Image (cartoon, helix red, strand yellow):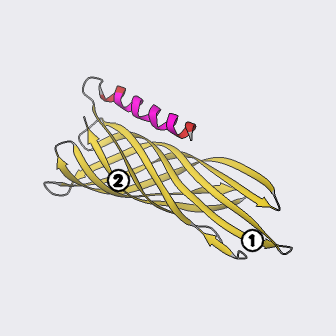
């Protein structure tokens, strides 16, 4: 939890410093929502591949439309139970990512906007399993592409309500992989 807080704080401070440089137009934002991890649930007695997650991002415009962004994503946790020898094995998959990429911002109407995101992310997938009082965990990091789409509504100049979808196909662990999705609602503040 402390590591995630440090990452979010670091992204925010870095973006604020970049935005305060001469000629830069900075912004920060975040969102909360629901997640889905595409996993194979065959052979499980229970499988919950959805959860809660969120994102935090910041960046600066180098043209009115194009920006560079730093992002942190929490893609949530999937939980499962598998019967082995009459006893259940319970486990979870937790996925998060840190990314850098480009964002394209376009006006759709007076108060409406569209944002498209494309970048690379270091995706961390952590698996934990428990069986008869024993617990084991495994963690893997992969660098993979991510993309996102968002629609925003400007409530005041520089303050926007956003609905977004972020995606990566890179939740990899022990040779298995699955796509991760985040549907979120959040806010963005330009300065």
Q: Would residue 80 be found to the left or right of residue 158 on screen? A: right
Q: Which residues are magenta?
A: 5-16
Which residue is depicted at the point 37% across and 39% down? 58
Q: Which residue sits furthest front?
A: 133
Chain-order first, disc 1 or disc 2: 1
Principal secondary structure, stretch drawn in magenta: helix
Q: Secondary structure at mark 2?
A: strand
| Residue 106 image position (x, y, % from top left) | 24, 51
Q: CA distance from mark 1 to mark 2?
A: 39 Å
- Foreground of the two, 83 or 23: 83
Q: Which residue sits furthest right?
A: 85
Q: Is residue 70 above or below residue 106?
A: above
Q: Would residue 157 be found to the left or right of residue 164 on screen? A: left
- Specify the quadrant that holds the C terminus: top left
- Foreground of the two, 114 or 153: 153
Q: Quadrant of residue 1?
A: top right
Does the residue at mark 1 contact the one at mark 2 (Cβ under 8 Å)?
no
Residue 9 lies within the magenta run: yes
Which residue is depicted at the point 30% across and 54% down? 162
| Residue 87 image position (x, y, % from top left) | 82, 71
Q: Is residue 40 above or below residue 188?
A: below
Which residue is depicted at the point 69% across and 55% down? 127
Residue bearing mark 1: 82
Q: Which residue sits furthest left?
A: 110
Q: Give the numbered dot on residue 32.
A: none
| Residue 152 image position (x, y, % from top left) | 26, 55
Residue bearing mark 2: 116
């Amino acid at each position: 939890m402390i590591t995630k807080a440090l990452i979010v704080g670091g992204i925010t401070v870095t973006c604020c410093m970049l935005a305060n440089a001469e000629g830069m137009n900075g912004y920060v934002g975040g969102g909360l929502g629901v997640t889905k991890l595409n996993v194979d649930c065959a052979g499980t007695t229970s499988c919950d591949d959805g959860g809660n997650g969120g994102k935090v991002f910041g960046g600066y415009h180098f043209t009115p439309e194009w920006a560079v962004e730093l992002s942190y994503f929490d893609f949530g946790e999937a939980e499962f139970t598998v019967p082995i020898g009459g006893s259940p094995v319970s486990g979870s998959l937790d996925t998060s990512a840190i990314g850098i990429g480009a964002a394209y911002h376009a006006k759709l109407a007076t108060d409406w906007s569209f944002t498209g995101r494309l970048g690379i992310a270091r995706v961390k997938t952590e698996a934990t399993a428990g069986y008869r009082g024993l617990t084991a965990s495994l963690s893997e990091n992969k660098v993979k592409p991510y993309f996102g789409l968002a629609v925003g509504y400007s409530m005041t100049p520089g303050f926007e309500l956003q609905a977004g979808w972020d995606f990566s196909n890179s939740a990899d662990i022990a040779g298995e992989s699955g796509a991760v999705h985040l549907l979120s609602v959040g806010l963005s503040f330009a300065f």
